[in-house]
Amino acid sequence: MKDVNQVAPKLKKGSFGNNLVYQHNNLITACYDLTVTEKKLLLGCICKINSFENITSETAFRFDVKEAGDIIGVDLTNTGAVDRFRKAARGLMTKLVTNDTADGWVDTTFAQTAEFDSIEKIMTIYFSKGMIPYLSDLHSQFTTYRILHVGKLDSKHAIRLYELLVMWHGQNYKKRKKGYKKFTIDEFIKIMSGGESYKSVISMFKQRVIEPACEQINKETDITVELTFKKTGKKYTHVELEFSMDDEWINAEKEFKKLLSDEQIRKIVNNPQFFTKYYEQYKGQEGVTGFLDQAKKLLAENPKKHFEDYADYLKDQSL
């Protein structure tokens, strides 16, 4: 569960972690097995895509030293870290992602080429042709989340479960406080890419894979999940999940999406020039009080529409 004493989250303008990851749901549910570093490198590439536009296998995704550190948690000025990036990139070029289709199946690799410029300290990744439909020109059946929510997850199973929870929430539970899913043990192990070895030792799968994954998700992300293994007699047969988006993160998203923060609005309405220019237009029946209330409302709603030159009153751009 979330720490009740935790400071309310806040999204910061300009932070790499705020970048959005867009993936077709078929990629979320596909079969593949990446390490944590490989997965984070993949997500780092994906969050650079404008998913509503077309990309091709010739589109380059470049990272400087700082971005690479944010993505895979290493400093590329260190030779060993560069080797770690190269190893992760090779994994994306050799490991398969498999999707079942109505007519059969599709196998592809994630990436086709990786480059590193040791002088400029720039890494470049090119997706494979088969990956493009999962990432480009997405208008339906896709899942999105901010990359910061997987940044502190150090388990590949935690990342996979988090993506599934976000997808399920988006599909069915937007109007409900809690989402619910039920699977047989075999179904759940398959969807979590748990491997055949866990089917014979469910307690190991529960203790080594799922419980740590849920603990990380509850601590580090915007989702709270409760997962219960159900028995029929003495044998585990089903898994039940209840999950919800945290109110604190929902509020943080709403605040982040505002064109102006509450502090910026306060600063604008308290500016004498702003008051002089717009008072007569927006004072209403209640004079100064009415003007302040109306100005705050309109600035929060659409400042560019109601106050064409509102930006002139922002003296402190760091707010």
Image (cartoon, rainbow, N blue to C red):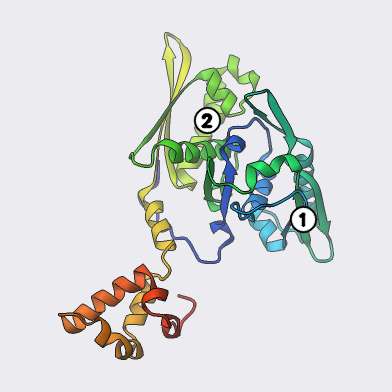
- Badge 2 is on which residue? 210
- Badge 1 is on which residue? 124
Residue at the farthest left position: 285
SS type, badge 2: helix
SS type, badge 1: strand
Residue 152 appearing in the image = no
Residue at the location (32% across, 72% down)?
Answer: 298
Q: Residues within 10 Å of mark 1 (few under 14, many from 20)?
A: some
Residue 277 position within the rendered picture, expressed as x and y whole percent measured from the top left: 33, 89
* 245, 73: nearer the viewer: 245
Residue at the location (45% across, 81% down)?
Answer: 311
Which label sits on residue 14? none
Is the C terminus in the top left, top right, bottom left or bottom right quadrant? bottom left
Residue at the location (68% across, 62% down)?
Answer: 66
* 288, 201: nearer the viewer: 288
Residue 267 position within the rendered picture, expressed as x and y whole percent measured from the top left: 36, 80
Q: Are marks 1 and 2 in contact (CB under 8 Å)?
A: no
Vertical relation: 3 (above or below) 214: below
Q: Residues within 10 Å of mark 2 (few under 14, many from 20)?
A: many
Vertical relation: 108 (above or below) 297: above
